[in-house]
Amino acid sequence: MPKQTIREKIEEVRQQVKANNPKGTGARIKNLAVKAIYAGFGQPDWVKFMEEFATTKQQLARLTTRDTDCHDYNEPARAYLVGNATCLPGTDGNLLQGISEFLDVSLQEPAPEKIAAPEDRY
């Protein structure tokens, strides 16, 4: 089975928010997003938020560092993701707004090592 892309994971989370609205996933993700914004890029709260959208270590690096940036739009796409999440759970349809496929560019091969799901880490 092919690995899940960042975009696919964002869509999966969006569907969870929609299903749990207004409690549950949406409120939790919004809380993580607000903490991430106040903490700042690369800080532990930023990483904790982005872990929700990564299924591999390479994806998490793309979301939490500039080391894997390969497109000028990677940085704005990360900002859109955390910014969009602050509108949850009420506007569950906008998590992908402004992101497109930019966060997945060049992360398709080789198959990276899996990381634990956020709920299994804490």
Image: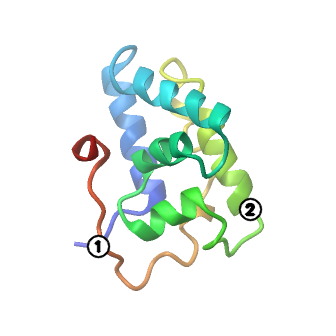
> Which quadrant: the N terminus?
bottom left
| Residue 101 visible (yes or no) | no
Front-most of residues 95 and 111: 111
* Residue at screen point 60% across, 73% down: 68
Tell me which amino acid carries mark 2: Tyr
Q: How is the image coloured?
A: rainbow
The furthest residue to the top: 22
The residue drawn where x is 68% and y is 62% is 74
- Quickly name the residue at label 2: 73
Say what secondary structure mark 2 lies in: loop
Graded by Cα atoms within 10 Å as few (under 14), some (14 to 19) or many (20 or more), the crowding at tag 1 reads: few
Question: In the displayed structure, does residue 94 sit left or right of residue 23?
Answer: right
* Position in image of residue 100 (x %, y %): 61, 56
Element assignment for label 1: loop
Say which residue label 1 marks.
2
Q: Tell me residue 34's x, y (percent).
A: 59, 27
Res. 14 mark? none
For the residue carrying disc 2, how many other residues have a C-alpha within 10 Å: few (<14), some (14-19), or many (20+)?
some
CA separation in Å, label 2 and label 1: 25 Å
List x then y, in percent, for residue 36.
58, 37
Judge by depth and name the residue closer to the eye, 70 or 10. 70
Q: Amino acid at mark 1?
A: Pro
